[in-house]
């Protein structure tokens, strides 16, 4: 019995020693079967505001808001790596969310789920080149991509951490 307990303890100790470096974690496939999960910085849901509240803050003149925690419904995610997502706004448009320092990815099939994000909200110009890149990542056709000819001025978000539920 003592040998069995000792063997179990050794297995647990050895498995905890195999942590991956941050670079390996970034390049690993994201497990999309998880029902609720955290990505990036360890955050909680406490103190989050609605997308409508964030939009109202921007509409009242703020062009950059640091350390804001916002909750919204995910509209789409990058289908190549999960390196960005869009979140619905109540006016029918979306807010693009990138991840700080390209440091983490989200599941490619997270559309339709809720997200809580902590980070930096700002009004940004997205170039035609970037918009075409995002359209390609989203699986748009060549014709749809070529129709993108104007930059976009919109609310954007750089997340330090995300909870998807």
Image (spheres, rainbow, N blue to C red):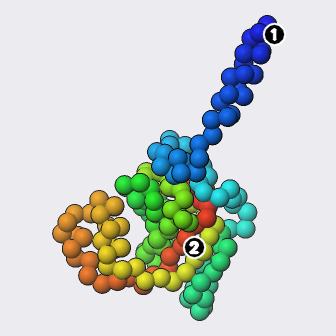
Q: Position of residue 132 (x, y in %)?
A: 30, 71
Give whichever of discs 1 and 2 has the lower sequence position: 1
Residue 4's image quarter? top right
Say which residue label 2 marks. Answer: 51
Residue furthest to the right in view is 2
State the residue lying farthest toward the left: 143
From the top left corner, tell me how far across and down residue 126 is, in percent.
40, 79
- Mark number for residue 68? none
Question: Depth check: 128 or 148 in front?
Answer: 128
**Of helix, strand and loop, which one carries label 2?**
helix
Per the image, label 1 sits on a secondary structure element best described as: helix
Packing grade of label 1 (10 A; few <14, some 14-19, many >=20) is few
- Taking the spot 61% from the left edge, 64% from the top edge, the residue there is 160
In front of the other: label 1 or label 2?
1
In the rendered structure, the answer to whether residue 105 lies left or right of residue 147 reads: right
In the rendered image, residue 110, in percent from the top left (x then y), is placed at 47, 53
Q: Is residue 35 visible?
A: no
The residue that appears at 50% across and 79% down in the rendered structure is: 155
- Above or below residue 163? Residue 69 is below
Q: Are marks 1 and 2 in contact (CB under 8 Å)?
A: no
Name the residue tied to disc 1.
Answer: 2
């Amino acid at each position: 019995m003592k040998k069995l307990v000792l063997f179990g303890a050794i297995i647990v100790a050895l498995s905890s020693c195999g942590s991956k470096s941050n670079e390996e974690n970034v390049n690993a496939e994201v497990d999309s079967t998880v029902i609720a999960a955290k990505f990036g910085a360890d955050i909680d849901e406490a103190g989050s505001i609605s997308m409508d509240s964030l939009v109202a803050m921007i509409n009242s003149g703020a062009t950059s808001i640091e350390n804001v925690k916002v909750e919204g419904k995910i509209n789409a995610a990058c289908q190549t790596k999960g390196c960005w997502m869009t979140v619905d706004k109540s006016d029918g448009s979306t807010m693009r969310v990138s991840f700080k320092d390209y440091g983490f990815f989200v599941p490619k099939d997270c559309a339709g789920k809720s997200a809580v994000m902590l980070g930096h909200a700002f009004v940004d110009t997205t170039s035609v080149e970037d918009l075409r890149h995002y359209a390609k990542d989203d699986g748009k056709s060549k014709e749809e991509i070529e129709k993108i000819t104007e930059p976009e001025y919109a609310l954007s978000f750089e997340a330090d951490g995300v909870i998807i539920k």
